[in-house]
Image (cartoon, grey):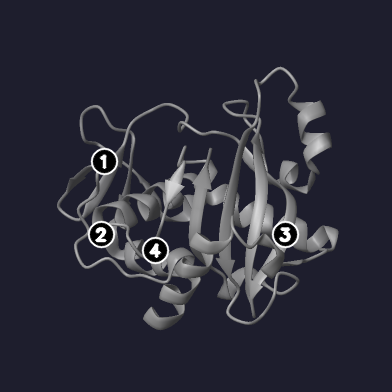
Amino acid sequence: MKTKLAALLCLLMLLPACAWAASPAPLSDTARYGVNVFLSNFSEQGITRFDPAEASDAQLAEFAALHIRINRSRYVEASDKAGYNARVSDAYIRDVAEQYTGRRPQSLAPVNLTYENGYYYFSEGAPIDIGFVSMSAAEELDEGVFGIYFGCYGAGWGWSNEDCRLRPEQAAAKYWDAGAPYTGYAVIDTGMSGLEADRSAWRLIDYRID
């Protein structure tokens, strides 16, 4: 795995100089939706840079805790701690982090969240996000590894997963008053399954927003 990651990072460094090495990857609407949902797990947290290979345990743990708070209500408990209305057990953190990044944090202490006695605590209020992802193009960088060009739309506007079915021009038209979209590039390792397959084997290699 480390050898493959090293090779991919080298490839990413070379891409601006030899973009011809990548092959365009036309996708079905179903695959586009899958890519958009997968990457929206990062944009919905307001993340603008994420490199799993370089991320600290604290970053991995915080990503997983926030992902659970936003997307997995069955794991969210009510909290009686003053100033907080919800909590998430750290029992799920390593599995969620591995699911999206391929890494399991050893330490479960987060970057900014309150963490006490095996629980992450959350207060009222909507999470800060930069919108949902709508991809504009995909390219195959290596067998089963894809680069994704995308924009983020609807920041702070209560978007839903159904919006991930929108193409960029549709997303821009729907959320025209939400400000200019953020633009970015991500690399996804599909585990040889490809972007048309189920997302269960996908892992993020890199994610950057301008």
Give the residue type that dot 1 points to. Leu
Residue under pointer 3:
138
Task: Please state which of the two labelled residues, at mark 4 or mark 2, is closer to the viewer.
Answer: 2
CA neighbours of label 2 inside 10 A, class few (<14), some (14 to 19), many (20+): many
Task: Please state which of the two labelled residues, at mark 3 or mark 4, is closer to the viewer.
Answer: 3
Residue under pointer 4:
97
Residue under pointer 2:
57
CA neighbours of label 1 inside 10 A, class few (<14), some (14 to 19), many (20+): some
- 104 w.r.t. 79: above or below: below
Q: Quadrant of residue 24?
A: bottom right
Task: Please state which of the two labelled residues, at mark 2 or mark 1, is closer to the viewer.
Answer: 2
- Mark 3 → mark 4, Cα distance in angstroms: 24 Å
Q: Does dot 2 land on a helix, a strand or a loop?
A: helix
Q: Earlier in the sequence, mark 3 or mark 2?
A: 2
Q: Earlier in the sequence, mark 1 or mark 3?
A: 1
Q: Does dot 4 land on a helix, a strand or a loop?
A: helix
* Residue 1 shown left or right of residue 87 in the figure: right
Task: Please state which of the two labelled residues, at mark 3 or mark 2, is closer to the viewer.
Answer: 3
Give the label on residue 113, or none. 1
Task: Please state which of the two labelled residues, at mark 1 or mark 3, is closer to the viewer.
Answer: 3
